[in-house]
Image (cartoon, rainbow, N blue to C red):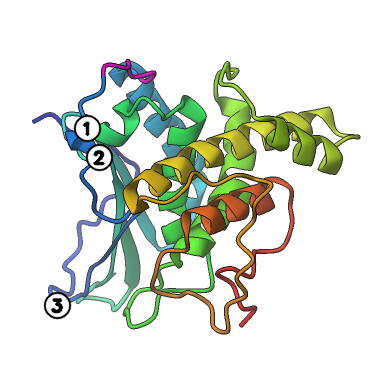
Amino acid sequence: MKIFLVALVLVTTAINANAQTTQRAIFPENDLHLDKTTRMSRITKEVFDKLLITVMHQYRRLTVTSNLSLSISGDWENEKVNAYAAQRMHVDNGNGRRTKVARITILGGIARHPDITLDALALVVCHEVGHVLGGAPYIKGRDVRVSSEGQSDFYAARYCMEKLVDKLPASAAPVSGMAQFVCEGRWFDNPNMNNKCKRIAAAGEALAGLLAKISRVATPEIDTPDMTVVGETLYNSYPSAQCRLDTYVAGATWQPRPACWYAGD
């Protein structure tokens, strides 16, 4: 099995062997890879590898100026429809320096799924980066700060993709009428941001649609937002497929985080 790896920072010092590792996946574990469809994948291995390099380069300066070791790997041969971010805190036994070590792995199954466009795959990678860099609210009960699922979605759409879209090829993927409506309404006076918003929203529709298949629920729509108002932020669980779409759209339009997962605490 060949695993493509991009790593800009390596930890070579003695580390704390008892450090706790936290791993999060963009989707719950699922069996989508067993659905052998006749539709063709839109993503080739060459495109897959190039995307991972592009994202890694986007965060090059951060990884070399902070106590962070970040690697992004692509396991192209793995058929599972998922992606992971594993993190642990390493402590140098010599000088006590703490380094956050994060390893992101994108599986070939999610890249090859026929519903996934290049922008949707980019959003997947950005979501995993969000677990590392997205900030609060964090998953509870861990000894390393890992951003929650909702926060990782929001970071992916609002911050990571907003910069990454400029580095990606022009998209030929269709944009829904509602994505056009909300983006043109928000960014009517800014053509560049209007275009970015449409691409991010369309990517979010693709990912939320996949999650709906996993959860066996109706396909989310931009004009049917999740009206749930949580009493406590969802720190350790996945928001609904509709709520995740709402979060991607909120990020694309620079709106507050949705109340379906974020309680403001």
Mark-to-mark CA distance, 3 and 2 = 35 Å
Residue named by callout 2? 32
Query: Which circle, 3 or 2, is nearer the viewer?
Result: 2
Would you say the residues marked 2 and 1 are in contact, meaning their CB atoms lie under 8 Å apart?
yes
Q: Secondary structure at mark 3?
A: loop
Mark number, residue 264: none
In this view, 208 is above or below 265: above
Amino acid, disc 2: Leu
Which segment did they paint magenta?
Answer: 38-43
Taken as a whole, is the magenta stretch helix, strand or loop? loop
Residue under label 3, please give it.
Answer: 18
At a point 26% along the width and 23% down the height, the residue shown is 37
Q: Position of residue 149 (x, y in %)?
A: 44, 62
Q: Neighbour class for label 1 at 10 Å: few (<14), some, many (≥20)? A: few
Query: Who's the residue at 60% across and 70% down the image?
Result: 228
Distance between the Cα atoms at labels 2 and 1?
6 Å
Instruction: Determine which residue is flagged by label 1.
Output: 35
Q: Amino acid at mark 1?
A: Asp
User: Does residue 138 appear in the picture of this structure?
Assistant: yes
